[in-house]
Image (spheres, grey):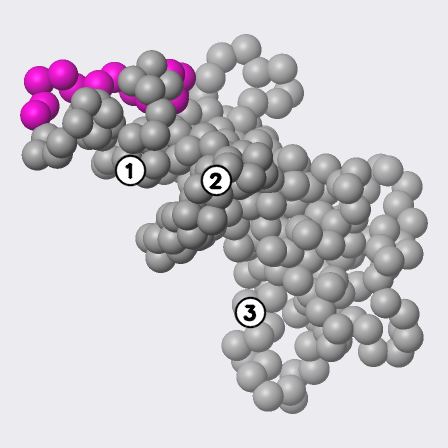
């Protein structure tokens, strides 16, 4: 990334980093040649790499550099072929280090994009991706909001799956009822597994745990979320708690959507239809 920025100005480099709240450490003297390389390295030196919020902001800086490289390719710059090769290498290094690139160019840690693979088949108007993005975007600094978004993501997923399955809802169903119904319809409910099926002793408790995860996210949201017109923040809530809830919600949403889309999923037996 530093070498790509050598082709810019000091002002452009400063704007890129400072827009995300970074400050160059002018006291740091890196072992590199040139003002631009030195300036970039001074910004690197000012980053607390142990702080996940700082890393998130650095990812946005990287997104800006990748966007700049893409624009050079689109403009058919005389060095476009070199830039294209550099971008491919840059993206490969990011993938190696545990990050993935969304379709809109956003960088995400891989553990945050597992469910992204499952949401590609969703209709454009679906609210599920927005709930998930709000959940992950707020998990560090706004744990209450992340917890509320986690519950919303699960609820939206259950309603989407039931709609695809042709199950009409009254709008009065409580959260636990939605979870129970969707797992029964998708044959992910403990009661839908034959007790003599191979691995039933492990499968049945696991499916029960899946429902428990969803319902506990709802309970935690009622206790700690930012809904219900709460007057004050709940004490003791930290990003450690919201990360736990977010990972649980991500796992649940991913399992429901994966099962809904899987060609050989058990729920398809006897239906003879594919999801729209």
Rendered location of residue 116, percent (x, y): 59, 50
Position in image of residue 172 (x %, y %): 84, 37
Above or below, comparing residue 123 to residue 64 in the picture:
below
Q: Marks 2 and 3: which is nearer the front?
A: 2
What is the C-alpha distance between the residues marked 3 and 1? 53 Å
Mark 2 burial class by Cα count in 10 Å: few <14, some 14-19, many 20+:
few
For label 1, count other residues whose C-alpha is less than 10 Å away and answer few (under 14), some (14-19) or many (20+). Answer: few
Question: Dot 3 corresponds to which residue?
Answer: 205
Task: Give the residue number, with chain letter if any, for mark 1.
Answer: 3
Label 2 or label 1, whichever comes before in sequence order = 1
How far apart are the alpha carbons under marks 2 and 3?
Answer: 61 Å
What is the chief secondary structure element of the magenta stretch?
loop
SS for dot 2: loop
Magenta-drawn segment: 13-29
Q: Quadrant of residue 254?
A: bottom right
Tell me the tag on residue 127: none
In screen coordinates, is 80 left or right of 207? Answer: left
């Amino acid at each position: 990334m530093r070498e790509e920025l050598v082709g810019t100005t000091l002002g452009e480099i400063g704007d890129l980093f400072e827009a995300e709240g970074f400050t160059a450490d002018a006291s740091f003297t890196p072992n590199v040649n040139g003002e631009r390389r030195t300036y970039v390295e001074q910004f690197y030196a000012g980053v607390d790499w142990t702080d996940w919020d700082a890393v998130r902001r650095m990812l946005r800086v990287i997104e800006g550099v990748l966007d700049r490289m893409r624009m050079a390719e689109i403009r058919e710059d005389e060095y476009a072929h070199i830039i294209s090769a550099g971008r491919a290498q840059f993206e490969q290094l990011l993938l190696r280090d545990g990050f993935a690139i969304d379709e809109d160019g956003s960088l995400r840690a891989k553990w945050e994009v597992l469910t992204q693979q499952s949401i590609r088949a969703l209709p454009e108007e679906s609210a599920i991706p927005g709930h998930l993005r709000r959940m992950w975007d707020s998990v560090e600094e706004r744990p209450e909001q992340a917890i509320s978004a986690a519950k919303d993501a699960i609820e939206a997923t259950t309603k989407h799956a039931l709609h695809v399955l042709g199950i009409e809802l009254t709008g009065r169903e409580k959260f636990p009822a939605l979870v129970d119904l969707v797992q029964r319809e998708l044959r992910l409910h403990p009661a839908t597994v034959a007790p003599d099926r191979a691995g039933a002793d492990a499968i049945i408790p696991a499916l029960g745990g899946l429902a428990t995860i969803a319902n506990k996210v709802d309970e935690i949201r009622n206790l700690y979320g930012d809904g219900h017109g709460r007057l004050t923040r709940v004490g003791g809530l930290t990003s450690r708690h919201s990360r736990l809830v977010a990972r649980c919600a991500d796992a649940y949403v991913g399992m429901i959507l994966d099962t809904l889309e899987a060609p050989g999923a058990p729920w398809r037996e006897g239906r003879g239809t594919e999801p729209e």
